[in-house]
Image (spheres, rainbow, N blue to C red):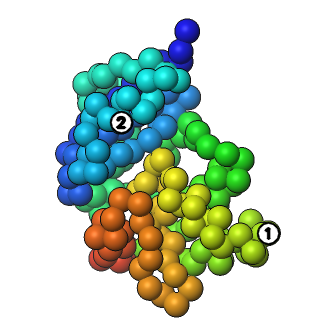
Amino acid sequence: MNELIYYTTINSPLGELLLSSSLKGLMSIEYLINLCEPEIIKKYSSKYTCEKVKNHDTRFFKLIQELNLYFDGKLKKFSISLDLQGTNFQKIVWNTLLNIPYGETTSYSCIANQIRNSKACRAVGQANNKNPIPIIIPCHRVIGKNGNLVGYADGIQIKKWLLNHEMINKYS
C-alpha cells in the first residue's frame, strides 16, 4: 500500500499555493500558476495515495499560520517539520539553503564551497531548481556570483518578489 500524503491549497500574495505533507512533515509547496492541481497530484499518485484536506486541518494549521506570518513580514524563520524527497546531494544543498539568513543572499559558488565541493556550482543550481519546498527552503536567496538574479524554477518575477519582500521586512 502506498504511503498517504495530504494536500490542500491556500491563497498567497504570489497566487494559489498547493501544500503537500506526509505524516513526517511538509513535502512540497507548488505554485498553481505554473501547474494545475490534478497535474501535481498525478505526479505523486504512483508513489503515494493522495488525500485532499481542508486547509484548517491540523496537519496544515501551523504551516499556514507560519506562511501567513511570513507574507505579513512578521516571520523570519520557519519551524515546521520537513519530509525532504530527493537525492543525498539535493538534501545536502537544501539543508545548506536553510541557513541563509532572511533578507540576505548568497551565490551558487558560495553554497558549493559550504558543502565542500567548490566545483559543484552547476549541480547546486540544479538542486535549487528541484527544490520541492520553495519559500521555506529559500532557494530564492541564491543569486549569481555577479549579483544578478538568475534562475528560479517558478519564474524570476517570483524570486524578485520574495527578495524584495524580505528586504523591506528585514528589520521590522
CB under 8 Å between discs 1 and 2: no
Determine whether the residue tagged by mark 1 lies in a helix, strand or loop: loop
Name the residue at 20% across, 57% down. Answer: 13
Of residues 75 and 116, the one nearer the viewer is 116
The tag earlier along the polypeptide, 1 or 2, is 2
Residue 54, position as x, y percentages in the image: 25, 25
Amino acid type for the residue under numbered disc 1 = Arg
Residue 89 in view, yes or no: yes
Q: Which mark is residue 116?
A: 1
Residue 3, position as x, y percentages in the image: 53, 18
Quarter of the rendering occupied by the N terminus: top right
Image quadrant where residue 121 sits? bottom right
The residue identified by callout 2 is 40
Distance from Cα at disc 1 to Cα at disc 2: 34 Å
Query: Relative to 35, is 25 on the left or the right?
Result: right
Count neighbours of disc 2 (C-alpha within 10 A) and say few if under 14, some if 14 to 19, many if 20 or more. some
Amino acid type for the residue under numbered disc 2 = Ile
Of residues 60 and 139, the one nearer the viewer is 139
